[in-house]
Image (tube, rainbow, N blue to C red):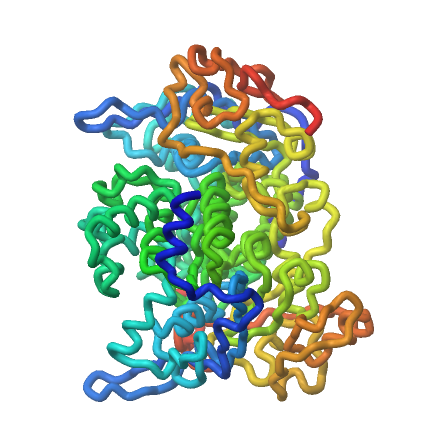
Amino acid sequence: MSTQRIQPAARHGEPLLAVRDLRVTFGRRGEEPFRAVDGVSFDVRPGQTVGLVGESGCGKSVTSLAIMGLLPTRGNTVEGSAVFDGEDLLSLSAPQMRDRRGADIAMIFQDPLSSLNPVIQIGRQVTEVMERHQGLSRKEAMPKAADLLERVGIPDPTARLANYPHQLSGGMRQRALIAMALACQPRLLIADEPTTALDVTIQAQILALLKELVVETGTAMVMITHDLGVVAGLCDEVNVLYGGKIVERGDRHTLFARPRHPYTVGLLNSIPRLDAPRGEALSPIPGSVADNLPWDSACAFAPRCPNALDVCVRQTPQWDGDDVVGLRCFNPMAVSR
Amino acid sequence: MSASAGLDAARGARTAAPGEVLVEVRGLEVHFPIKSGIIFDRTVGHVRAVDGVDLTIHRGETYGLVGESGCGKSTLGKAILNLEPPTAGSVIFDGVDIASLKGEDLRKERKRFQMVFQDPMSSLDPRQTVEALLLEGMRAHGLDTDKAATHARLRELMSAVGLPPAGLKKYPHEFSGGQRQRIGIARALSVGPDLIVADEPVSALDVSIQAQVINLLQDLQDELGLTYLVVAHDLAVVRHISDRIGVMYLGGLVEESEAGELYDVPLHPYTRALMSAVPVPDPTVEDSREQILLTGDLPSPANPPTGCRFHTRCPWRQETRCDTERPELRVVEVAGASSGHRVACHFAEQIAAGEIERHEVEAELVSEGFGGPDGPPTPPEAYIAP
């Protein structure tokens, strides 16, 4: 499509987004404030796909909402910095942030039915972004919207513009949402569980589409998911989150071949694989997130950890590594698995 | 385990030799009417959720049903238990046709087949304690006559699913998702069933918790000789826990096989596509494997395609037969396929032998809802760009 910038995917160079020591604390009435994100730092370079993986409650979605400035301000504190293109997104005012959202940075949400407005036609929802950021009239933007819908693989796009979200299937809605996110050719795309609500065959279609877009347009992408399989196929760099902190980071080949953190190993061992021999019992991670210790004076994962030492419940493990590879553990798994 | 001995005793002397047929489903159909009109409830069509399914479940085995949303797998699971009255067909459970049972006879028979639901939060009454939840079924079937024995049994149930006995006095909201699912399983076990239908038992749970529940289900099966029908969309989970698997597409079984064989020798084009779409947590495998991307969406079950239901999306579709003749499940002569491996495809042998080339499929637009065969009406062009 002519409106897309075609750039070779750059793997190195200056980070497009540099998140440093991000902390998000939710105030709770009559209770101790809850720290959902506890010092998360990572970089995203142009053309790179960075994965944030973890289970519910690990802070992966809150991280993305904080970067996008979409958390409710009342009662919550967001600390740290998220430098995008030389500018700290967290220090921007609400109107400044509105100029950025949808133009430079776009987001794809999990549930396409609740993130599309049910009483507005698809066409208007897609053109809205272009009207707001590119100053186009709706008439000018409509053909572009049809192009976008075609680009994301929606058959008969011109007719679809007049449809309402309920008239489209789940996969089509997610495609429409991706079209909206791409409308202003953002440089950074944050995808928060974009395929979780979809069936596997539709998931495969959407993942293939996202992969293609990243390669073709050089867009950087942050992929937030709980599905290690999705990460394995899509992300260049993988960050594993637990209890609001990144506990392990690495490029996908290293991380999956030689996971070091007991939590990463536990996650990999607890999912049945389609290509593994059958009949072996799964080894689940014992306990649940409710058993977590506070990070202040311990490793949060220690109560569930098979490798836990005495020090794990007395001291906070420090980040050992840099912005490419790293680990937060006193007693990691041996290198060979 | 003492708990299991007690549970076994409660089940009485019903346990028989494995391999015996426990459930025999023949020609099962569940059609939901589509109503229209304001004053007169006219029936304008039917959603064919389950449209002619034959399957057999043996005692002590785990039968897995997979398919995408809307394929009718959950409805089939419910219809087997007569929670959803079948429109046609029979379900012979240990010699009794459940599909034709009604009222008190059906209610009495229910203690032999129980269900575990997907969402433990909405399937457990938030205002009942765990004890009350577990007792309800036992009371309904008159299993709570001896107070001391009932009390002991409740404790056995809790320990069988790995929960502390103190949990009996608590309410569902005091438990985590995985623990709630354990309560759901304990409730199903409380009346000593032979068959448990588990509808997406782990899909609402976190990855690390899923494995705990899967292992629990397997341990319980080993100890109590239970028979499972597991309905799930996650192929890897189904393959892990099932002995045999049936793949459903638009209300019908398209392939049925022993679990390992289904992955090694998938014969139906839909099974192949489904298998290739599941992401594997291994970058090397992900980079090298061949994906069969299906185009378009599942057609509406209110208006299923003619002939083979899958022909609109099938990359191996042929000019003849596919769109006119609905294929029956049949055993095919293919290397690696055993006699229990059945597939509903006219050209399974040729596809397996590589005699038929895969081709591109143009996506057909599928509308949600019941917009008729052509989807929702399209407004005139002028309406689109005001």
Closest to the observer, A324 or B20: B20
Residue drawn at the location 58% of the way across and 37% of the way down: A268
Q: Is residue A176 visible?
A: no
The residue at 44%/11% (across/down) is A315
Q: Position of residue B226 (x, y in %)?
A: 46, 59
Q: Is residue A63 left or right of residue B309?
A: left
Does A200 sit left or right of A286 as displayed?
Answer: right
On-image quarter of the C terminus of chain B: bottom left
- The percent coordinates of residue A249 (x first, y second) are 58, 26
Vertical position of residue A176 compared to residue A13: above or below: below
Nearer to the camera, B380 or B232: B232
Indicate the position of residue A207 as horizontal and vertical percent values. Answer: 58, 50
- Label count reads 0
Question: Can you tell which quarter of the image residue A333 is in?
Answer: top right
Query: Looking at the image, is B3 positioned above or below residue A151?
Result: above
Task: Please determine whether, in this image, residue B289 is positioned above or below residue B355.
Answer: above
| Image quarter in which the N terminus of chain B is found | top left
Vertical relation: B61 (above or below) B5: below
Please tell me in which quadrant of the rendered image residue B167 appears.
top left
Name the residue located 35 percent from the left edge and 51 percent from the top edge. Answer: B186
Return the x and y of residue B59 as percentages of the image width and height.
Answer: 51, 66
Camera-side residue of B329 and A169: B329
The answer to whether residue A170 of the structure is visible from this angle is: yes
Q: At x 48% / y 37%, what residue is drawn? A: A105
